[in-house]
Image (cartoon, rainbow, N blue to C red):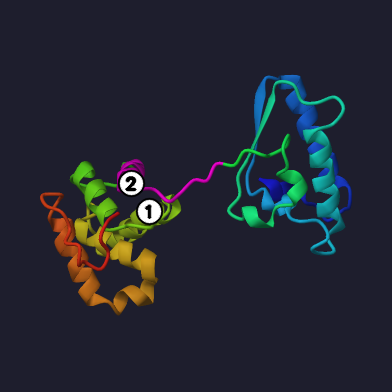
Amino acid sequence: AASEFVEMFVGRGAARIRELFAEARKRAPCVVFIDELDAIGGRRGAGLNEERDQTLNQLLTELDGFEGRPGIVLLAATNRAEVLDPALTRPGRLSRKVNVPLPSEKGRAAILRVHLRKVPIDDLEAASASVARISAGMSGAELANCVNEAAFLAARRDGDAVTMDDLAEAVLRTRFGVNGAAELPAWLAWLRSNLALGGRREVRRSAPLGGS
């Protein structure tokens, strides 16, 4: 992660960048991935963080230095592309951008199948499809939280497996918070009724949380 390069001592972050690319050159061809790039790639001069600015300067030098970086592909991820320094995204550096949207209903079902394999449940496929239908707009992390929350609810009632009712309440807790879900019994009843359909018919368009 990019935050691991930022140290309290000025110059240490830049040294870590040099070490990273030196190791990458030894192992070329290879892929270098930096997560949360905005931690070091934010606009220079926006604050008084000299250490971060020096770290970014070193990264820019490594991206198009005199020696180049043959055989090294740099990938980076951020949720805040708008705060990145323009020098970082100019042609020849990190110029190609790929926006990853929130998952579709099919994508949500695939994500849920991965996470639901870790908990005891009667019908994995039906549960994945049903929860995907009522979780429009949720990210992968939120879907994982739904499964964890459903497991907590099942454990709280001493259940042997996660039920559709647990999943319905977990979706509400993830979307509105624990207190918010408690104040929405009508939503919970609607979710439970649609989960009970098991994919036998489509959710009504007038429903509060229709799938995408």
Q: Residue at x 77, y 46 (%)?
A: 87
Direction from residue 186 to residue 8 in the image, left or right: right
Q: Residue at x 70, y 25 (%)?
A: 72
Residue with the mark numbered 1: 143
Quarter of the image holding residue 155?
A: bottom left
Q: Is residue 138 magenta-colored? A: no
Residue with the mark numbered 2: 112
- Helix, strand or loop at label 1? It is helix
Q: Identify which amino acid the numbered label 2 is placed on.
A: Leu
- Helix, strand or loop at label 2? It is helix
Quarter of the image holding residue 211?
A: bottom left
Mark-to-mark CA distance, 2 and 1? 7 Å
Which one is in front, 79 or 130? 79
Which one is in front, 78 or 128? 78
Task: Tell me if label 2 and label 1 are in contact, CB under 8 Å.
Answer: yes
Direction from residue 163 to residue 103 in the image, left or right: right
Q: Which residues are magenta?
A: 98-114
Q: Identify which amino acid the numbered label 1 is placed on.
A: Leu
Q: Position of residue 33 (x, y in %)?
A: 64, 36
Direction from residue 4 to residue 206 in the image, left or right: left
Q: Is residue 99 magenta-colored? A: yes
Q: Quadrant of the C terminus?
A: bottom left
